[in-house]
């Protein structure tokens, strides 16, 4: 009998031990997750923390399940497609809802000025002209980051909320409502300005250092901590050379500066590149569907200089920063290019070998096939490297294209080193 009792106790003890063992990893995981989150959020101001909560809140879509972070993944330089069946487009809160443009990265976008017209000098003639710059989205339709927040939240193809008030009500009844009250006051949700204030919190988060860490190899080269390889250095030289890549014409940096902040790799201007039509975009199955970009920006005529030809902007899209460009594919506003090398090669050979990039139509190459013919004159054919004609030698050969790609890979931000506790 005693042996039987001891056996049963042994069985119970072992069972209890296994239950504890099974429970321990879960508890440990929860603790680790909590610690990781606390470390991730260390240093954020209360308003930035509120913005982070909103940014990551999957209950803010209709139906629930989609957050800002779903399409602006921190692991992919704050861009992505939310598991879309079409690589170039993000999937919205409804499974059948897809956008019409590639999701832009939110990294470094806080440096973009408000949408405006700026003076730009023609390097050959010295003449100046007014050109659009700044704003958010591919067409600059949001003046600044706070205005940008509203777009995805209310867009039927994205988070699909019926109104600003509906978004505010979800946050009011959510888990971090008290944080919103601490940031903006007890009556935040009773104010007509509630949505705007909450949007500014998201903008504050998107303006925090985690969206612009300046932690790439290139940044450490500027700081004197690393050196470019021979191929990377060659690519950087070609990138800057006005007779070769001429990339600094739009993707600017202060050549004499060693400060990473002076190398944003964009002047936030707009350009018409004549990108090939992306057949994978469902809307493009309709030949009548055309994305004209900047010239269709709402309210543009009211803010453009008097007498400005709005049609001259058709086909133009914002020049993004090239920071993290190696991990933010596919490329261009319609995501037509899957690889970074392809898009650099396109810049170099678009005009010398158009048959490489455009389809045939009626026996001829249908150049600029995603833009109505009446707007073809808007496409940039004057600046290097676009100034070559079919059959002429391109400004960049294949090896030089490889070198520029090698340099562009040095612009990828690297994770901050994990601090280790001293033993």
Image (tube, rainbow, N blue to C red):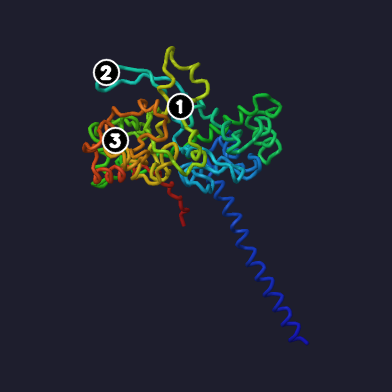
Q: Which residue is mark 1?
A: 294
Q: Which residue is mark 2?
A: 126
| Residue 146 at x, y percent in the picture | 55, 29
Q: The residue tagged with tag 2: helix, strand or loop?
A: loop
Question: Which residue is depicted at the point 62% across and 31% down?
Answer: 183
In which quadrant of the rendered image does the N terminus lie? Answer: bottom right
**How far separated are the C-alphas under marks 3 and 2?**
25 Å
155 or 168: nearer the eye?
155
Q: Which residue is mark 3?
A: 351
| Residue 151 at x, y percent in the picture | 56, 32
Q: The residue tagged with tag 1: helix, strand or loop?
A: helix
Q: Is 166 left or right of 378, judged from the image as shown? A: right
Question: Which residue is depicted at the point 39% across and 20% down?
Answer: 118
Q: Work out whether mark 3 precedes mark 2 in sequence or the reverse, and give the earlier one.
A: 2
Quadrant hosting residue 189? top right
135 or 55: nearer the eye?
135
Q: Is 79 left or right of 366, judged from the image as shown? A: right
């Amino acid at each position: 009998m005693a042996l039987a009792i001891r056996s049963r106790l042994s069985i119970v003890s072992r069972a209890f031990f296994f239950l504890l063992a099974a429970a321990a990893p879960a508890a440990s995981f929860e603790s680790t997750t909590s610690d990781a989150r606390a470390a991730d959020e260390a240093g954020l101001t209360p308003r930035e923390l509120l913005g982070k909560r909103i940014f990551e809140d999957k209950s803010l879509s209709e139906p629930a399940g989609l957050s800002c972070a779903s399409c602006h993944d921190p692991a992919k330089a704050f861009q992505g497609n939310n598991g879309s069946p079409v690589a170039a487009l993000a999937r919205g809160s409804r499974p059948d809802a897809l956008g019409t443009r590639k999701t832009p990265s939110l990294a470094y976008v806080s440096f973009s000025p408000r949408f405006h017209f700026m003076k730009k000098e023609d390097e050959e003639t010295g003449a100046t002209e007014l050109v659009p710059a700044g704003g958010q989205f591919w067409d600059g339709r949001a003046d600044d980051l706070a205005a940008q927040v509203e777009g995805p939240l209310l867009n039927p193809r994205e988070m699909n909320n019926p109104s600003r008030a509906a978004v505010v009500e979800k946050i009011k009844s959510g888990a971090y409502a008290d944080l919103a009250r601490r940031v903006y006051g007890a009556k935040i949700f009773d104010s007509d300005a509630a949505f705007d204030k909450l949007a500014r919190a998201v903008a504050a988060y998107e303006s925090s250092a985690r969206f612009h860490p300046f932690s790439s190899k290139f940044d450490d080269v500027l700081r004197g901590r690393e050196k470019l390889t021979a191929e990377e250095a060659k690519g950087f030289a070609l990138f800057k050379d006005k007779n070769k890549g001429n990339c600094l014409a739009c993707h600017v940096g202060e050549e004499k500066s060693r400060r990473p902040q002076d190398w944003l790799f964009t002047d936030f201007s707009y350009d018409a590149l004549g990108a090939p039509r992306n057949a994978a975009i469902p809307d493009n199955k309709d030949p009548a569907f055309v994305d004209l970009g900047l010239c269709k920006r709402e309210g543009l005529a009211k803010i453009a200089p008097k007498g400005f030809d709005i049609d001259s902007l058709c086909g133009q899209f914002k020049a993004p920063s090239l920071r993290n460009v190696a991990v933010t594919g596919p490329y261009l506003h319609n995501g037509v290019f899957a690889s970074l090398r392809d898009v650099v090669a396109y810049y170099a050979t678009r005009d010398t070998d158009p048959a490489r990039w455009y389809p045939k139509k009626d026996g001829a190459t249908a150049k600029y096939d995603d833009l109505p013919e009446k707007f073809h004159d808007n496409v940039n054919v004057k600046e290097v490297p676009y100034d070559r004609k079919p059959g002429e030698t391109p400004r960049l050969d294949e090896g030089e294209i490889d070198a520029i790609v090698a340099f562009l890979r040095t612009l990828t931000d690297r994770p901050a080193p994990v601090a280790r506790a001293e033993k």
